[in-house]
Amino acid sequence: MPTNKQAYVKLFFTTKNNSLYCIMPNYQSKITIHNIETSKDLKIGILGQSNILPSKQVNKNLEIDLSGVSKCELPNKIFVIKIEGVRGN
């Protein structure tokens, strides 16, 4: 884990069609994506898995709960979260 004197990236983003992809370089039990609008048909999951991740919209931020996913269930140390139903994508 980085110290206060180090910069680091929590997430990388890319888009394809109507989906936003969050590339996560390491596991976090909860992530917050700032300034994002979602639609009613929001669907969030980890690529390569079928389960849907719980999330909630808090003001202009999207909070995604990964606490139900153990590190050993992840396909790799680096993994991708697919978010379908993002407005303005």
Image (tube, rainbow, N blue to C red):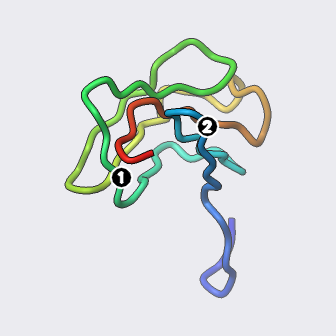
Where is residue 47? Give x, y as percent.
65, 25
Residue at image point 34% right, 60% down = 35
Q: Amino acid at mark 1?
A: Ile
Residue at image point 46% right, 28% down = 44
Work out whether residue 38 or residue 28 is closer to the camera in this orientation and state it: 38
Q: Residue furthest top?
A: 50
Earlier in the chain: of badge 2 and badge 1, it is 2
Residue at image point 35% right, 42% down = 87
Q: Residue furthest left?
A: 59
Label of residue 16 in the image: 2
Task: Look at the picture and state if 36 lies above or below 8.
Answer: above
Where is residue 61? Give x, y as percent.
31, 54
Task: Look at the picture and state if 29 lies above or below 4.
Answer: above
Work out whether residue 70 or residue 21 is closer to the camera in this orientation and state it: 21
Q: Residue furthest right?
A: 76
Q: Between label 2 and label 1, give the one nearer the viewer.
A: 2
Q: Is residue 52 left or right of residue 28?
A: left
